[in-house]
């Protein structure tokens, strides 16, 4: 693995995780009795914004590392 990807990978993984949590919350959170899924549903907009920010930061770090 090259150094550029190694530097950006934690941000990219966290960004994808935020989008995964938002997708789980949006898909199953409304009708679920699980507190975790209801929490993810209530935090959907924040998870999308944080995920987008993390993915953008990872992309910028990947592009800047030489």
Image: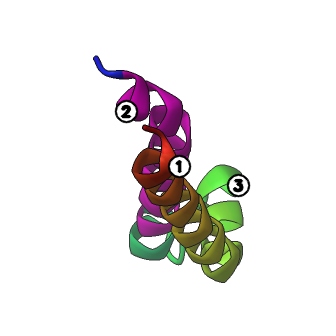
- Farthest residue toward the bottom? 45
Q: Residue furthest left?
A: 1
Residue 43 on image: x %, y %? 70, 72
From the viewer's perspective, is residue 16 above or below residue 38? above
**Quarter of the image where the N terminus is located:** top left
Q: CA distance from mark 3 to mark 1?
A: 35 Å
Give the residue drawn at x 40%, y 33%.
4
> Quick one: 43 or 31, which is closer to the camera?
43
Q: Residue at x 61, y 68 (%)?
A: 53
Q: CA distance from mark 2 to mark 1?
A: 9 Å
Pointer 1 residue = 61
User: Of callouts 2 and 1, which one flags the residue occurring earlier in the amino acid sequence?
Assistant: 2
Q: Looking at this view, name the residue that lies furthest to the top.
A: 1
Residue 29 at x, y percent in the picture: 53, 69
- Main SS of the magenta part reads helix
- Left or right: 50 as drawn, with respect to 30: right
Q: Quadrant of residue 57?
A: bottom right
The C terminus lies in which quarter of the figure?
A: top left
In the image shown, does 53 or 39 lie closer to the viewer? 53
Label 3 element class = helix
Residue drawn at (70%, 55%), measured in percent from left and top? 35
Tell me the CA gap for discs 2 and 3.
35 Å
Q: Which residues are magenta?
A: 3-23
Which residue shows up at 31% across the image and 21% down it? 2
SS at circle 2 = helix
Task: Point out the residue furthest to the front here.
Answer: 66
Q: Which residue is mark 2?
A: 5
Mark 2 nearby-residue class (10 Å; few <14, some 14–19, many ≥20): some
The residue identified by callout 3 is: 35
Label whose residue precedes the other's in the sequence (3 or 1): 3
Query: Neighbour class for label 3 at 10 Å: few (<14), some, many (≥20)?
Result: few
């Amino acid at each position: 693995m090259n150094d550029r990807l190694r530097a950006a990978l934690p941000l990219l993984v966290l960004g994808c995780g935020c989008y995964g949590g938002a997708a789980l919350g949006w898909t199953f959170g409304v009708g679920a009795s699980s507190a975790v899924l209801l929490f993810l549903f209530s935090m959907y907009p924040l998870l999308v914004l944080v995920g987008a920010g993390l993915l953008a930061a990872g992309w910028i770090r990947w592009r800047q590392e030489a």
